[in-house]
Amino acid sequence: GAGVSQTPSNKVTEKGKYVELRCDPISGHTALYWYRQSLGQGPEFLIYFQGTGAADDSGLPNDRFFAVRPEGSVSTLKIQRTERGDSAVYLCASSLTGLGGTSYNEQFFGPGTRLTVL
Amino acid sequence: GQNIDQPTEMTATEGAIVQINCTYQTSGFNGLFWYQQHAGEAPTFLSYNVLDGLEEKGRFSSFLSRSKGYSYLLLKELQMKDSASYLCAVRVPSGGYQKVTFGTGTKLQVIP
């Protein structure tokens, strides 16, 4: 596709439920990032994939959060036993290559998934 | 740790010039980004600075001083459509790779 796409655009769930958020990066982009953005805040880094592997998952808040990218393209962010504090917009971004070296490798963001935990 | 500071809100008049400041204290530095984010939309890239000095791109310019841990985004000939949040983000080393840490953003309101 022309840009990064994310599904669903909105997800409402109940406390304790399991959710999956999907990201389709720009074709050919090897690097993929997940961020979480709360109202009035900047994006908070969660995890970064280089190809199929998670190069940096230091931003995942706890073991309820997990992300995969099995074929190096589409990625799924999985949240178990959701809590009301997980409510936020989850942003996905991709770049042509990773953040190594001196090239800045602009990140292209998707429209986000708005997660609401009741 | 990483600390990136920006003013929370600013107001400016259509046609004027506005400067949005960003100061940072980070563990390492490999470049600074500015992004624009309209309400309810994804951030879009504006500029990248890795060396000291001014980078100009049309109505937008970005300045960096690494010794002072300081950057600013300059918007000229403001238009109503420039009303948005402006995010300062710093690229820092992380576990053999690098990651981008964002500030909280500056919400700019352009008034007639």
Image (cartoon, rainbow, N blue to C red):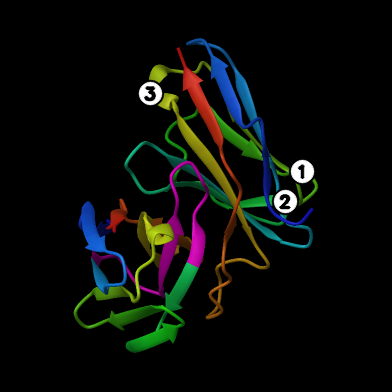
Local crowd at mark 3 within 10 Å, few (<14), some, or many (≥20)?
few
Same subunit under labels 3 and 1?
A: yes
Closer-to-camera residue (A113/A48): A113
Residue at 46% over, 82% down: B57
Residue B32 lies in magenta, yes or no?
yes
Name the residue tied to disc 1: A70
User: Which labelled disc corresponds to residue A52?
Assistant: 2
Q: Is residue A115 above or below residue B54?
A: above
Asked if disc 1 and disc 2 are in contact, CB closer than 8 Å, the reply is: yes
Residue at 43% over, 58% down: B81
Mark 3 and mark 1: Cα distance apart in space: 28 Å
Indicate the position of residue A104 as horizontal and vertical percent values: 53, 75
Indicate the position of residue A62 as horizontal and vertical percent values: 44, 31
Task: Identify which amino acid the numbered label 2 is placed on.
Answer: Thr
Indicate the position of residue A100 as horizontal and vertical percent values: 56, 72
Residue at 22% over, 52% down: B9
In the image, the segment drawn in magenta is B23-45
Chain name for mark 3? A
Question: The C terminus of chain A lies in which quarter of the figure?
Answer: top left
User: Which labelled disc corresponds to residue A85?
Assistant: 3
